[in-house]
Image (cartoon, grey):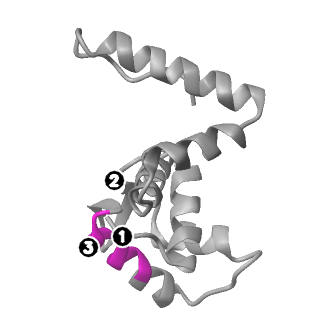
Amino acid sequence: MERLGDLEAEIMDRVWSARGPVAVRDVRALLEPTRPLAYTTVMTVMDRLFHKGWLTRERAGRSYRYQPALSRSAYTALLMRSVLSATDDRGLALLHFVQAMDATEYETLREAVRWHSASRGRGGEEPTTS
């Protein structure tokens, strides 16, 4: 999947923050205070996000209700993997990444690695950290 553009990222942020499916008018209203846009602009971008695979949708009368196709954390992981794949020395890039972490982030990473190691043999569930 490709990276999100600025407006796409703002729209996805509102969809990720919603507590369920949202209509175009809902997203437009959430954007209004900081970025007033025409209804058709929001509708076009959300339709493009659907066709790119970022959103799912189902009919609700004459319009659609949208939901994210993947979580915000899954998107972040895709970005991290994309950035990491751009380097010629992944080990060194990871070392710099870890060195820049605070103690809480480092402990979260250690827990994720422990979970991953333990789950390899049992088909594992997703970790509970967010």
Residue under numbered circle 1: 2
Q: Main secondary structure of the magenta part?
A: helix
Residue 18 visible here: no
Instruction: State which region is magenta.
Output: 45-53
Label 2 crowd (10 A; few <14 / some 14-19 / many >=20): some
Q: Dot 3: what SS?
A: helix
Give the residue type that dot 3 points to.
Answer: His
Residue 103 is inside the magenta segment = no
Mark carried by residue 51: 3
Label 1 crowd (10 A; few <14 / some 14-19 / many >=20): few
* Mark found first going from the N terminus, 1 or 3: 1
Q: Quadrant of residue 119?
A: top left
Mark carried by residue 78: none
Q: Relative to the observer, which residue lies in front, 22 or 124?
A: 124
The quarter of the image holding the N terminus is: bottom left
The quarter of the image holding the C terminus is: top right
Q: Relative to the observer, which residue lies in front, 114 or 21?
A: 114
Counting from the top left corner in percent of width and height, residue 85 is at 38, 57
Residue drawn at (43%, 69%), measured in percent from left and top?
3
Q: Dot 1: what SS?
A: loop
Label 3 crowd (10 A; few <14 / some 14-19 / many >=20): few
Residue 107 as seen in the image, left or right of residue 90: right
Q: Are marks 3 and 2 in contact (CB under 8 Å)?
A: no
Residue drawn at (70%, 39%), measured in percent from left and top?
99
Residue 96 as seen in the image, left or right of residue 3: right
Residue under numbered circle 2: 69
- Residue 42 lies, with reference to residue 120, above or below; the image says below
Counting from the top left corner in percent of width and height, residue 118 is at 36, 10
- Residue 55 lies, with reference to residue 48, above or below; the image says above
Q: What is the distance, in whole Å, between disc 1 and disc 3 at their CAs? A: 12 Å
